[in-house]
Amino acid sequence: ETNIPKKRTGSSNHSKAIIKFYEAIYQAVLRHIDFKKIKCVLCASPGYVKDDFFKYMLEQAVRRDDRALSENKRKFVLCKASSGHKHALEEVFNDASIMVQMNDTRLAKEVETLNRFMRMIDTSPDRAYYGYNHVQKANE
C-alpha cells in the first residue's frame, strides 16, 4: 500500500506520490506478470486512475523500450471499480461486459464456480463445513 497525499495548492507532493505509485505498479507488472502464460490483465480503479496509469505504463514502455508491455497492451482490460480495496473485485467480476471480454479465460470459469458455491451457501447453509471431518461429512 502506498499513501498518497491530498492535492494542495502550491504543493507537488501529490504528483510526486502518484508518479512513485505508478512506478511501483509498473515494476510489479514487469516483475510478476509472464505475458506468455496469461490471457488478460484487469486494471480496475475508481475514477480515472486506471486510465492515467495505463497511459503512464505505455509511455514508460516506449521510453524504456520494454517490448513485453508494448506488444501485450491489448491484454490489459480497463474497468471501473467503486474503490481500491480488494472487496471491489467482486463487483468487477460481476460486471457482464468484463466477463464477456474474459470469457475464454480460466478465471471466468472460476468466478462462475465461486458464484454457484455462494448461491448454494445462501440456499442451504447447513452444507457449509470447514474442518477436515466436517468436509468429509458434507461429502457423504
Image (tube, helix red, strand yellow):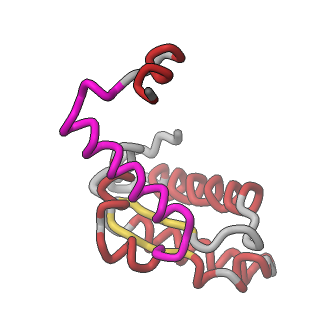
* Range of residues picked out in magenta: 102-128
* Position in image of residue 43 (x %, y %): 48, 65
Residue at 60% x, 53% y is 20
**Residue 130 versus residue 119 in the image, above or below:** above
Residue at 42% x, 56% y is 111
Residue 110 sits inside the magenta stretch = yes
**Residue 122 versus residue 44 in the image, above or below:** above
Residue at 53% x, 76% y is 104
Near-viewer residue (36 or 3): 36
Location of residue 125 by image quarter: top left
**Residue 68 versus residue 9 in the image, above or below:** below
Near-viewer residue (140 or 134): 140
Residue at 77% x, 73% y is 36
Residue 69 sits inside the magenta stretch = no
* Position in image of residue 45 (x %, y %): 38, 60
Q: Quadrant of the C terminus?
A: top left
Location of residue 72 by image quarter: bottom right
